[in-house]
Image (spheres, rainbow, N blue to C red):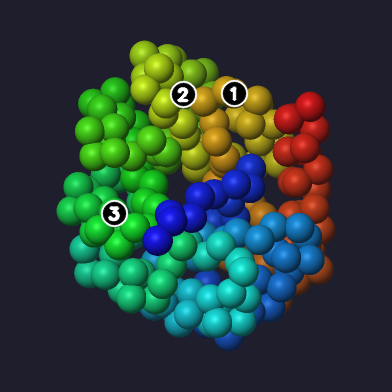
Amino acid sequence: MAIKEIVQPIVPVVVIDDASDAEPLAEAMLAGGLDVVEITFRTAAAPEAISRVKKAFPDMLVGAGTVVTPEQAQTCLDLGVDFGLAPGLNPEIVKKFQANDTLFVPGVMTPSEIEQGLSLGCKLLKFFPAGNAGGVKMLKALAGPYQSQGVSFCPTGGINVGNMQEYLAAPVVRCIGGSWLAARDQIKNKQWGEITAQVKEALALAASAAE
């Protein structure tokens, strides 16, 4: 089975409190032009929300975020997620996803963690929390010694519509993760039109940054 890769420049990071919001949220993302979403394991509704989106939109790339225990990892794999992410690097979780031929993006913030990720075969790493850890300047310095190893990053944390282009312009950045595309309160309040508009704006800025 071929491992699915993230090809979009932006991955919406969403927190869903009510699983019944999953399908309309996915519809709002798709209407804006994004066919990828990361549903975080920060609420009890996450597994059902992932299942709902996978069933309703089989062509959408559905990932699980904040996967911090082996038990959560197994739940994700049982649900058939296309990829997983975590704020940190747990070798046991990495190996679980690899054994299932499923992309996993562990979180790193130091050279030692980058090297550990590379030793496990992870070439795409999550730089988290990007804003608090020094932003683009820190990421470029951190990544410099490892670019020859083919490493790339998905910075997440503190990224917004105002600074996203700066991150995407960095050669070491494969994609960015952003929670502003669909804020938790917007999902709770079912503001699907606003979410679609935010996705369209972000993709337009991403396209501009790539020129």
- Observer-side mark, 3 or 1, equals 3
The amino acid type found where label 3 is placed reads: Gln
Mark 1 nearby-residue class (10 Å; few <14, some 14–19, many ≥20): some
Answer above or below: position of 29 versus 207: below
Residue 142 in view here: no
Give percent across and percent down for residue 87: 35, 47
The amino acid type found where label 1 is placed reads: Ala
Left or right of 104 on screen, residue 90? left
- Disc 2 marks which residue? 139
Which image quarter holds the N terminus? bottom left
- Observer-side mark, 2 or 3, equals 3
Give percent across and percent down for residue 147: 43, 19
| Pointers 2 and 1 in contact (C-beta within 8 Å) | yes
Residue at the far left in the pictured view: 92
| Pointers 2 and 3 in contact (C-beta within 8 Å) | no
Which residue corresponds to the image point at 48% horizontal and 74% vertical from the top-left? 50
In terms of secondary structure, where does tag 2 sit?
helix
In terms of secondary structure, where does tag 1 sit?
loop
- Disc 3 marks which residue? 98
Which residue corresponds to the image point at 24% horizontal and 39% vertical from the top-left? 120
Which residue corresponds to the image point at 73% horizontal and 65% vertical from the top-left? 30
Answer above or below: position of 179 versus 128: below
- Disc 1 marks which residue? 170
Query: How far apart are the two marked residues, 3 and 1, measured between alpha carbons?
Result: 28 Å
Along the viewing direction, whichever of 58 and 23 lies nearer the viewer: 58
Number of marks in the rendered image: 3
Mark 2 nearby-residue class (10 Å; few <14, some 14–19, many ≥20): many
